[in-house]
Amino acid sequence: MAKPGRASRKTRSTAGGELHALRTRAAALARRAAALRVAQAALRESEARYRTLSDRSIQGICIHRDFIILFANPALATMFGFESPEALLGLDLRRALALDERTRLEGYHAARLHGEAAPLRYECEATRHDGTRIWVEVMASIVSWAGKPAVLGTVVDITARKRVEGLAAAQVRVLEMIGSNVPLPRLLEELTRTIEAHADGMLASILLLDEDGLHLRHGAAPSLPEPYVRAIDGIAIGPSVGSCGTAAYLREPTVASKIQCDPRWADYRDLALAHGLQACWSTPITSADDRVLGTFALYYREPREPGLWELKLIEIATRLARIAIEHHRTEEERASLAELVREAPDAIVSVDTQGRFRTFNPAAERMSGYRAGEIIGTPFSEVGLLDAPSLARAAHNFQRALAGEHRHPSELTIVRKDGSLLPLEANLRLIRRDGDVAGMQVTLRDVTNRRQAEAALRASAERYRLLFERNLAGVFRVGSDGRLLECNPALAQLLGYPSPESMRAINARDLYVDPADRQRLLARLQSDETVTNHEVRWRRADSTTVWVLLNVRQMVEGISTWREGIAIDITDRKRAEEAAREAAALRTVAHLANAAAHEINNPLTTVIGRLDMLAQRLPDGSKERDLVAKARAASDRIREMVTRMHQITRIEYLIGPDEGLPPILDLRKSSDD
Amino acid sequence: MPAILVVDDEDDIRSFIQAALEERGYRVLATRDPQHALRIATQEPIHLLLTDVVMPLMKGTELARRLQAFSPSTRVLLMSAYTLLEATASGYTNLAKPFTADTLAERVQHVLDQPSPFARPRPQGGPSDG
């Protein structure tokens, strides 16, 4: 800085002053130049720093004026698929925007230039150099570029985030569809389409494991070629059945990144390749309880290995598929249960903890005569459905059951709407919701028929008992070992025992007079279930014999066998038959005797007559007369015998079989008399 | 002399009876054929029909019934080698074979001695008279 000089030295001091001033100025200039140099260096450094920042930024940076790109950094170039930032310079940004986005962003731009409010940050969808689409988030601000206002845009690629968001939204949509009971095929198709929409070039497929657990059935594959879908529908799972059959069999993800070379595809390779399918990754869909429900597969038309994103998609898809399938099956079960309740012959109703009717199925309507609408919401104690004793019992059981006590089925009588009574059997079951008792399900069965059947059975049993007890024929049951299990009083009487009880120790084999009779009976029972009119002789308690007619049936129930039968005493008939037989034999003898007598008597008459005549002609005491007298005596003897034979024909009564021949028929005996 | 008509299909019997009765003085007509016997009875009075019961062509009881139909006074004596139930039931006097000549004669005389409402004039005397 120049200092002011003195007057005496004015000239010297003036010149000196000027020099000083010049020096000072020069110094100042030098200082300024130095400062400028420093500033320029700093600026260069700053520029370099900003360029480095811009070049190395992972965010895209661009400066545009009226959408014409004035500056772009490498990150932006990479983001949009260009080789270098320079390739972007001079391009119209709007060409990378969809039409609707273009209008929106132009609006923002205009507002910004006019100082009006416009979003500083916004998202938009853009097209890359190769035509693929990306989502970007842009932060825009007005800057001065080469002295004129321009827009600085900082651009972030949010495609991945958007994809995740889109996928999340899609998941929600699929879940909503599951919740709204969209039919399973449509749901699975929607699921596969959703997955396909979130990755390029993939063809998704879902196969469902058949109820037999051995075959895979078509589930959904909207993008796979129809003939291929048909061809693999119903394939049997196995350790080497493509990707899906193998995945379902081994219960683990099966990746065939190159179908052409994959040994597990040996049997299906040609089929897949013929339809241009080159890679297939399949993952089993397993239930919450670890049962295989099906498979989710992604096909590609070129050899590929799954990336992280695809793995994510597969995970989401299998999870959604599992939920969809399980929900569907649960729904099916619920529907079939609901139908069961609707179609059940038994009344099925539910009441809440206050005893108010909550449900009332059609059978309940039929039985009671009330419509569900008349009943629901009303406590069972107030409907008048139960007669007084039943109501007391029902209320008691209800309270006990609510308290957790097990209640056995109880019988109730309901009063139908028309006043008639109906006997029912009630079964109670607690309904729990989230662990808490929520009410009671009551199953009511019409027991009218059962009661009638029970009464009929009792009557029948009583009739049978009477038939057994009072039967005039002996009725018995014998074990397979011959032991007498049961018999009626008539049998005891027939065999001369005081009571059926006194016959307990008897074995049937001891009853037979001739054991062969029993063997014949058993042999017949081997071939026929029933043997009728088998006549045998049994031994009575007092050792006398009795003829019985047996009708015996072989009985089998489970592993136990026995015989039951009826024994009728036919001793009298047998005796009568015997007597008739003997009488017939006697008659034959009598007829023979009579015929013989006739044949003898005629010549005997001549012999006797002629001998008498001869005797009269012979002198008394002569030897000839004596001989004639002997012949005459013999003739008389013949006549006597014939006379006895004659008498046989006079037997007009029958004689007992045990009494032997009457003396009169015993010619030898009678002649000896 | 009472006429006795003897009918029997056994020739030996017939000839024995004829001999035995003729020996005792009866007039005896004999035949084996019941039809012939009926013809004889139409031609001459028969006091006694002595006939076998069982014969092949006609039973003795039938012969007696038919003969008495036109000759009610003829007495009947049945003979039979069989049991005499039938003969007894017929109501006629009967004689069981075999019999002796004496028994025959006694029974014949006994039957001839029975009174009959349709009796012809009783021939005088018995066989001994003949």
Image: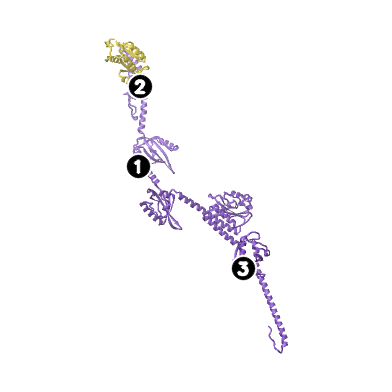
Chain colours: A purple, B yellow
Few, some or many residues within 10 Å of mark 2 (<14, 14–19, 20+): many
- How far apart, in angstroms, are the residues tagged by discs 2 and 1? 58 Å
Q: Which residue appears at 35% of the width and 21% of the height?
A: A594
Q: Amino acid at mark 2?
A: Asn
A532 vs A435, nearest the viewer:
A435
Whole-percent x and y of residue A556?
43, 41
- Name the image quarter holding the N terminus of chain A: bottom right
Q: Amino acid at mark 3?
A: His
B125 vs A625, nearest the viewer:
B125
Mark whose residue sits in front, 1 or 3: 3
Q: Is residue A287 left or right of residue A654?
A: right
User: Residue A566: in sight, yes or no?
Assistant: yes
- How far apart, in angstroms, are the residues tagged by discs 1 and 3? 123 Å
Instruction: Identify the disc placed on residue A127.
Output: none
Up-down relation of residue A449 to residue A123 (above or below): above
- Write down the chain letter for disc 2: A
- Write down the chain letter for disc 1: A
Looking at marks 2 and 3 on the same chain, the residue that comes earlier in the sequence is marked by: 3
Residue placed under numbered mark 3 in the picture? A114
Q: How many marks?
A: 3
Residue placed under numbered mark 1 in the picture? A501
Up-down relation of residue A577 to residue A74 (above or below): above
Residue placed under numbered mark 2 in the picture? A594
Whole-percent x and y of residue A179?
51, 56
Looking at marks 2 and 1 on the same chain, the residue that comes earlier in the sequence is marked by: 1
Looking at marks 1 and 3 on the same chain, the residue that comes earlier in the sequence is marked by: 3
Of helix, strand and loop, which one carries label 3? loop
**Quarter occupied by residue A540:** top left
User: Residue A626: in sight, yes or no?
Assistant: no
